[in-house]
Image: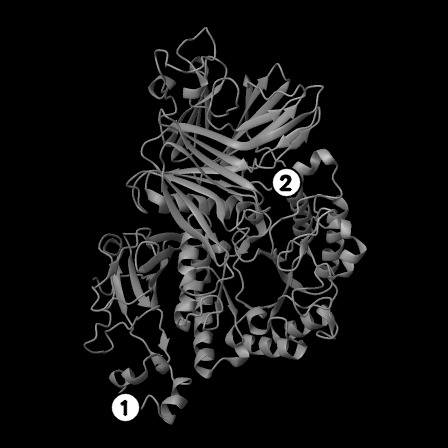
Amino acid sequence: MIKYIEEDKTFHLQTKHLSYLIKILPTGHLGHLYFGELLDLNTKSESLITKFDIEVGNQVLYSQDDRTFNLNLAMLELSTFGKGDFRDPMLHFRLADGSRLTDFLFKEFKVLSEKPLFPELPESKTTNQDETETLMVTLRDDIQDIEIDMYYTLFLEVDVLTRRIVIRNGSSQDITIEKGLSMNLDMLHLDYSFLSLDGAWIRERNITEHRLEYGILKIDSKKGNSSNDHNPFIAIKGKNTSEEFGPCYGFSLIYSGNFEATLEVSPHRLLRVLFGIQSFDFHYPLKKNERFVTPEVALTFSASGLTKLSQNFHEFVKKNIIPLQWQNKERPVLVNNWEATFFDFNERKLLQLARIAKKLGVELFVLDDGWFGKRNDDFSSLGDWVVNQKKLPSGIEGLAKKINQIGLQFGIWVEPEMVNIDSDLYRLHPDWAIQHPKYTPSLGRNQLILDLSNPEVVAHLYEVLSTLFSSANITYVKWDMNRNLSDIYSSYLPEEYQGALSHLYMKGLYSLLSRLVQAFPNILFESCASGGNRYDLGMLCYMPQTWVSDNTDGISRLKIQYGTSLVYPQSTMGAHVSAVPNQQTIRNVPLETRFNTAAFGLLGYELDLTKCTPFEKKVIQKQIAFYKENRSLLQFGTLSRIISPFTTNQCVWNVVSKDKTSAMLGVYTIHEEPNSKLERFKIKEIDEFIPYRVKNRIQYFNLDQFGHLIKHALPIHLNANGLLFHLLKNRYLMKAEEIDLVYSGQVIANHGINLLQNFIGTGYNESVRLMGDYGSRMYLLKQVAEVEHAS
């Protein structure tokens, strides 16, 4: 709820478990008091405010009326430059007279029962207005006649609040926004560290920790998308904060374009956090009586470690970001033909792949790149969304019908934002591409980007795509984007708007996506951008899932998915099983581990099933059956991280169903440790007052994995180089160990599940786990009616 204490000039914003307090300072500036664990609703500012009581040397006094107050030492909710605050500002303008000076003071506030909507940008939403409440505080610069509406929306049940501002130019003069961020948060620096999700193509969202010292730390993107360099998410944590203990703050931007997140520690150990649209090369003209809306930032706090912080974000994403019709809808198991065929396919080959996929339990067939124009490589035809009749003589409609007759749903890949120079569209409209007419354009993946700041381009794409999506029974669309912006110039925009092109591009994209998802509510859209180059809350407002990474290696994906889970739930993570050696790492990860990693996401297979051995087909069939039986748990369960692959040789995580009747534990070994220790793992989210049956997913080994060592595991002697071994290895399923025990919930939560001993080089029997390098196991916990056996 939101309470305003008039005599204290204080706003108290409160969710179930957190409080956020702000104060109208005597000068009229909006000050920050507190963000953290729940406080009494009547808490007064005198117990929270931090200030100097005598004048501090070498500072600029805001006013001679108060010789103790200067903006440089104030903790603020909004900051500008020019009145004595020398830290990085949240807002910066170029005004009609050439000056940059602004000073925004309190004008009024409103408490709104319904969340205001700004449909030009993606934003959080709710179907139950009782679960949200919004504070709007208006600040005004009387000299410049500019007003700032500051929005704070509380999501009461998930312990998240969002912030954004709207800038309104009420003057008779045009102004230019040089920097228009979404939030400013000042607080005392208490030996915090800063977490970010960094990486590169096929190495996305690795967790990086920086200790915050004097000066500025910044992550950003200038690529035209949110990027795989730095995800638009940051966390601030205490020195000893872990997954389970300690304070931490999280911030995630609901935006998919250029962004910046800045953390500055001042000489007086004040920490400033800024987040919003990238200010580099950003110049947005704001005409008189126009407004500028910034993206929302989602904020949350946990006193119980990073896992709880993530769980807050996960619930927020699932309830308040994902399109309503997909929030609780189970996603199909798919097969994608890309790594099976690349560009070299025809209808016969696709149908052969689909038939085998159906036999193995797959539900959705996805036709990837290469089905349109004359596209046999990545040099041509982007922009020409007309079927290649040589490859697909029955067209998309005919192929979709045949796929449906096999018993599979049909999905298709598109990359609408792009255009090849060798395309009919480019030959007709070269001015529709982002490029400067006086420069030879630099290409990425041999392609250019269409100028979505141009409404004519957006209208064309909507017409072409709506025709395609209506032409067949298409239930899934993979929307790709395979390059970053360069040669940034629009033939459509006037000179004064060139510095706003990147943002106007995003607004054009959002407009297109909004129209398409409204027109095709039953199509499941998956966002992709060279893998995870645009994995953000902005895209998730339209497309409920994202391709995590082009790296499908089952071991690389541990770090990628672990890092991704800091803010994004597993119900948003596209995760596929691919062939070995892996195309990105040349690593041979066992088929069971490839599945065990992908199963904690949205499962798909991306390999040539027609080339699979009988062993592989049998194992895949069992994997898919297991996933379907536990799909709701794996896709929508509450996720906890237990052991990090970034700091250890293992990765361990688990999910628990909402009603706590079931759970799944995933245990992964990256490199085997000889003579390893006994292991047990606690699962904290389960119900301590009921018993659970614990069983491991039955897994199978290929005999080839053991070579001559197989003589220690089989009752008969086989020559590892012999014909019989060769015939058996791709047909025989060697069963791994099996456990079936009943534990009390208290034991599971406080003592843990005992795993069978690992292989230690002295022998093998049915009570030994054979893990080895890249080994893994999944353990299923199911509530039982009564205790059959208590451990």
622 or 709, nearer to the observer: 709
- Between circles 1 and 2, the one closer to the viewer is 2
> x%, y% of residue 751?
22, 55
> x%, y% of residue 84?
48, 18
Which is more N-terminal, label 2 or label 1?
2
Give the residue at mark 2.
503
Residue displayed at 65% across by 51% down: 517
Label 2 element class: helix
Type of amino acid under label 1: Ile
142 or 585, nearer to the observer: 585
Residue displayed at 51% across by 17% down: 83
Quadrant of the drawing holding the C terminus = bottom left
- Dividing the picture into quadrants, the one containing residue 277 is top right
Above-or-below relation of 566 to 79: below
> x%, y% of residue 724?
37, 93
Q: Residue furthest top?
A: 65
Give the residue at mark 1.
716
Q: Residues within 10 Å of mark 2 (few under 14, many from 20)?
A: many
Residue displayed at 57% across by 40% down: 123
